[in-house]
Amino acid sequence: MSLLAPAFLFGLLAIGVPIWLHRLSSENPNRQPFSSVMFLEPGEPRRVIAKQLRYFLLFALRVGVLSLLTLVFAGVVLEGSLQNVLSETARLHVIVMDRSASMAHGNRWERAQAMADTIVDGLDDSDVVQVVAADRIIEVLVEPSLDRAPIRQAINAAEPTPFRVDYGQLMSSMDSLLRGAELPVVLHILTDTQQSSLPTRFADLAPRTSLELTVHNVSVSGEENWALDGLVWSALSGDLTANLRSYSEQDVERTVTLLLNGTEIAVENISIEAGQTAQVNFMDVELSAGANQVVAKLNPSDELSLDNERYLVVKQPIPRPILLVSSNNRDDASFFLTSALETLATQTYEIQRIFPTELANHSFENYVFVVIADAGALAENDSEVLSDFVESGGAVFMALSQRSAGLNFVPITGHSLSSFSQFRAEQGGFLAVGNMDSSHLVLRQLEGLRTAKFYRHIPVDIEPIDTVLMRLEDGSPLLIEHPKGQGRVMIFTSSLDREWNDLPLQPVFVPFMAQLSSYMAGDDRISIDAQLGSTLSSRAMGFSGGQIFAPDGERALGLAGAGAGDEVIVDQIGFYEVLASGQTEFVAVNIDAQESDVTPMPANGFIRWNELGSTPVETAEGGIAMIDDASTDLWPWILSLLLIVVIVESWVGNWHLRVRRGIAA
Amino acid sequence: MPGIAGKQSRDIQNLLNPEVLASLSNLELVARAAVHGFLNGLHRSPFFGFSQEFAEYKAYAEGDDPRFIDWNVYARTDRTYVKRYLGETNTRLVILLDSSASMGYGSGPVTKLQYAKFLAATLAYLAAQQHDAVGLIVFDEEVREHHPASSRLGKLSGILHAIDRASPGTGTNLKVPFEKFHQFERGKGLVVVISDFYCDPEAMIKGVQPLAYQGQDVALFQLLDPQELNPELRESALMEDMETGESMEVSPTFMRSRYRNKIQEHIETLHSSASGTGTDHVLVNTTDPLDIALRNYLLFRQGRR
């Protein structure tokens, strides 16, 4: 018997209260004034004893109530109705079954189950067995037990999951689990020894506690797998690309089927060379408005079916208006900007042009952002209007061009411009892009920007709150992000035409403008996916509350409890559906590509891992240990007893009070 | 109108109920209500009149007041007779009121001392109505109040106030009031002792005997609470003597049997001792209406006459 919260035993001090009360009571038993005691005689001893016994019963009941209440809070647990005294040779055999996705390959799982049964069969009757399943977490399927029936039942009932296992984390978790074990431990790990599951440091495979380690390899030589390990949609071209990878020593022919919103729209044949990757392009996929569910299937299916399908959610953006402020509709800047944005296959934006003089009477509410072709063309009033627009959450992309040369301050932001506001490179010379933040959404995968030549630009004195995304070779800021109020201003310190640089002529100009526009408009998430095992939150998707449904159609169980589906653990492959605020969003979840690699670790690595846990197991000190077979929480019984005692105490206490009232009357 | 008469009778009886009397704050009002209620009740009682009413004829003798010669009788018999009235048989009443601590006991709404005060006030009022001289001695271990007997107008008021002031004091010593009586009360008359008589009967009689030998008529009104006569105890209790503070734990069995025998024995001893000295002893239960005690007083007074 043990206590879950022994600190509550301090509650037993409350027993002092009835002791004190009954002490007083015994000192003042029904004291009654009487005219004279001249005719009275002391009571018979038997009667006095009887009275004390009645009080003792009430006292005992009150002490019982407090004691039982304390025990309920302390959480009395009866350990093991079958507590066993074990022999000196007894061991604790912990069977760890790797149930990661790769264990579903072929007959691996059946072999692992058979192997586990064999291990159980070979144990002594005095050996204690514990069964643990491992994937992204460690789950104890059966607590240490001498009873073989639940052990076999748990082994047969377990199944592989779509999660990945990491052997380093597995060993670390087992150390925590087995720390303090009272018996010598023999750890059996039944796994496919997947090379991709090895930790970065081989030393992480070593157990930190003294135990005997046996790793059982359930994979067999010659196992092969082909996986769809990627499905990508290009916003620029509108193409879908499926990536395939071979984990085999032979070339094969496969078919990739593409399903859009449940409808098969294309089938492509592909040959995959041994151990190589291959790509299948699906051109000009016509997406529907809103979110599109795209599934790529690899046919015929192989022995690991989980990675033969790939899921992708692509949102077809609704064309939204951009306001281009330019003093000349036919200038280069307007031409290049319009051309670049209209080149996007997705037709994300509609460009509307106005002159700076029209700004004062123009409403900006409907525009996702505003482009100023030349900041120098803005009047002071225009600057104030746009400043209000930005502070209320708007976005402005502004280039400093010829007319900006005479400015002392940048409109809207108020950045001061250097005294030599117009920089001119040496005759025939130019500056290329120097440092650039390639991790930023605007500049991601845009290394081609370095090929552009900048002949002129206007140096801007940056402020501490600014973020310089791109600099020229001399360190001058070229692209500055300036937060203002609830919005932001992006300043390009050179022109958007061919006068001061040749950027518009470079192929990278179109993707640059596409990513810049996407960032300014806030649609940086065109496709939505989540990693298996990660947390999916509707709040993170911009909703307040909402419900999340798993791919199997069931409502996903929220982390905050049943019914609170605001935040869930992603544990299924497919499309999660998020319903909130009258909108529906889909999230694609795919298997970890590392699980597709069924290649086992090298033989010498496997041998070395086994040797890491070959520490001779010592007999438990004293040779005898008590093992919990099954713990029974006793609180329901104690609570029932407590209720009975409370009722009896009330009855006895009331009887005493009634007697006292009777005397007084 | 038997219905109305019956209702009036019940109202009168209610007026004599100690609980009703306890609700009256003024002791004079209590006495007045009790006496008038009692007197009204007597209209249908077997007692004959006792105030300025005819009592007997007496042959005229020298010295008698000729105004009281009944000329009608003279006309019929040719003899002179004088009418005698009860009112002419005036006497002295001295009330000895015990205000010891034990008199403060009461299991109901009226304590023994309250009942004693009602009784004393009523007797004093009744006596004053008959033009008797009334005196008062309030005592416990000492004499707390002493008002010599007097029939002077306004004396009653002082006596009633003295009765009203009485509160439970200390122990009981009956020797002290009797000595006081000896010292100040010379003439013959009635002596009413109102007490619970928690004392040795022999010692009490020793105090009464000199008065009896002196020719005083002594009446002992022993007031006891129902819980003293028939105690009901459901479990053992610690009884604390109100006078001495002594405590004793007693059992219900004892209180139900042996105690009752002992208190009854005490009452009978007191009664027989009183009879031995020609003294009247009346046991009064404090839940009884006041008229029982008053009737006993009148019988006692009538017997003396």
Image (cartoon, grey):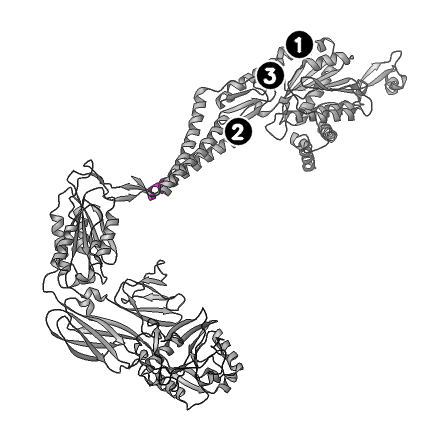
For this rendering, which residue is in front, A301 or A462? Answer: A462
Chain bearing tag 2 is A
Q: Same chain for labels 1 and 3? Say yes or no.
A: yes
Chain bearing tag 1 is B
Q: Which residue is mark 2?
A: A663
For this rendering, which residue is in front, A111 or A384? Answer: A384
Q: Which mark is residue B267?
A: 3
Vertical position of residue B158 compared to residue A173: above or below: above
The picture quadrant where one finds residue B207 is top right
Q: Which mark is residue B206?
A: 1
Q: Is residue B300 magenta?
A: no
* One can see residue A620 in this view: yes
Where disc 3 sits, the SS reads helix
Distance from label 1 to label 3 (Cα)? 17 Å
Q: Which residues are magenta?
A: A635-641
Of the image marks 1 and 3, the number of the one nearer the N terminus? 1
Quick one: label 1, few (<14), some, or many (20+) residues within 10 Å? some
Q: Name the mark nearer the viewer: 2 or 3.
A: 2
The picture quadrant where one finds residue B263 is top right
Q: Position of residue B37 (x, y in %)?
A: 72, 30
Residue drawn at point x = 45 percent, y = 23 percent: A48
Distance from label 2 to label 3 (Cα)? 25 Å
Where disc 1 sits, the SS reads helix
